[in-house]
Structures are given as structure tokens and as C-alpha cells.
């Protein structure tokens, strides 16, 4: 009594005997796609690691440059204070000299 239609078959139970065959079918159907996907994921992982390393190196470089800039700014600030001190001392000497010159008249 098929009436031109295919007879319904009962599902095949997975047994140790047909498990190998299922693995082979799965490999034939999805193996290439799985390998391609895994290769792409590995490539993405490598690129992420390279970006992480690059960012770490750039951050370290930036920290070093900021540290150097801070030290340079501190040095220039100290030098400016010394220059102002010398200028005030010279101004004091000049005023003292003017005062002594006015006292001679």
C-alpha cells in the first residue's frame, strides 16, 4: 500500500556500529566548512593577538614619552625659577649700585 508515495521509515538508532558511518557522513557534509571556519577563527585570533601586542607597545611608548615630557617640563620649570632668581639678584645689584651712585653726589 504505497500509493505512489515513499513508505515512512523509522529513525535509525545511533549504535556503536553505525556511529563511524555517521561521523563519515558528518565529515563529508560539514568537514570542509568546519575546517574553513576554524582556520578563519585561528586567523582572527592571531590578528587580535597582534593588535593587542601593538597596542601594548604603543601604550608603553606613549607612557615613556609622557614621562620624558614631564621630566623635561620639570627641568624647564626649575631652570626658569633659577633664571628669575638670578634676574632679581642682578636687579638688586643694579638698584644698590644706583643707590650708592646717588649717595656720592
Image (cartoon, helix red, strand yellow):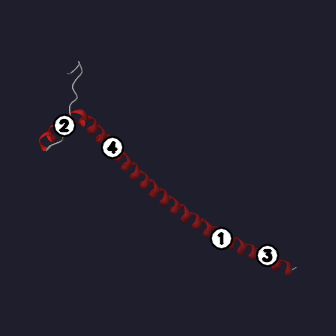
| Secondary structure beneath label 3 | helix
Q: Quadrant of residue 104?
A: bottom right
| Tag 4 and tag 3, C-beta contact below 8 Å | no
Residue, disc 2: 12
| Secondary structure beneath label 2 | loop
- The answer to which of marks 1 and 4 sits earlier in the sequence is 4
Residue, disc 4: 41
Tell me if 94 is positioned left or right of 80 in this view: right
**Residue sitting at 15 percent across and 37 percent down?**
21
- The answer to which of marks 2 and 4 sits earlier in the sequence is 2
Q: From the viewer's perspective, is residue 32 above or below residue 96?
A: above
- The answer to which of marks 1 and 2 sits earlier in the sequence is 2
The quadrant in which the C terminus is found is: bottom right
Q: Quadrant of residue 35?
A: top left
| Tag 1 and tag 2, C-beta contact below 8 Å | no
Image coordinates of residue 77 in percent, x first then y, are 62, 67
Between label 2 and label 4, give the one nearer the viewer.
2
The quadrant in which the N terminus is found is: top left
Q: Residues within 10 Å of mark 4 (few under 14, many from 20)?
A: few
| Tag 2 and tag 4, C-beta contact below 8 Å | no
Residue, disc 1: 81
Image coordinates of residue 25 in percent, x first then y, are 19, 35
Query: Cα distance, mark 1 to mark 3?
Result: 21 Å
Tell me if 7 is positioned left or right of 61 in this view: left
- The answer to which of marks 4 and 3 sits earlier in the sequence is 4
**Is 49 in front, or is 97?**
49
**Is 86 in front, or is 10?**
10
**Is 15 in front, or is 83?**
15
| Secondary structure beneath label 1 | helix
Q: From the viewer's perspective, is residue 88 above or below residue 68?
A: below
Amino acid at each position: 500500500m504505497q500509493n505512489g508515495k515513499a513508505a515512512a521509515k523509522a529513525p535509525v538508532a545511533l549504535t556503536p556500529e553505525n556511529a563511524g558511518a555517521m561521523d563519515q557522513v558528518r565529515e563529508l557534509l560539514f568537514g570542509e566548512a568546519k575546517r574553513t571556519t576554524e582556520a578563519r577563527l585561528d586567523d582572527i585570533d592571531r590578528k587580535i593577538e597582534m593588535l593587542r601586542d601593538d597596542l601594548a607597545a604603543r601604550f608603553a611608548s606613549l607612557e615613556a614619552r609622557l614621562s620624558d615630557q614631564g621630566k623635561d617640563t620639570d627641568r624647564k620649570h626649575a631652570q626658569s625659577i633659577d633664571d628669575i632668581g638670578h634676574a632679581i639678584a642682578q636687579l638688586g645689584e643694579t638698584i644698590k649700585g644706583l643707590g650708592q651712585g646717588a649717595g656720592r653726589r
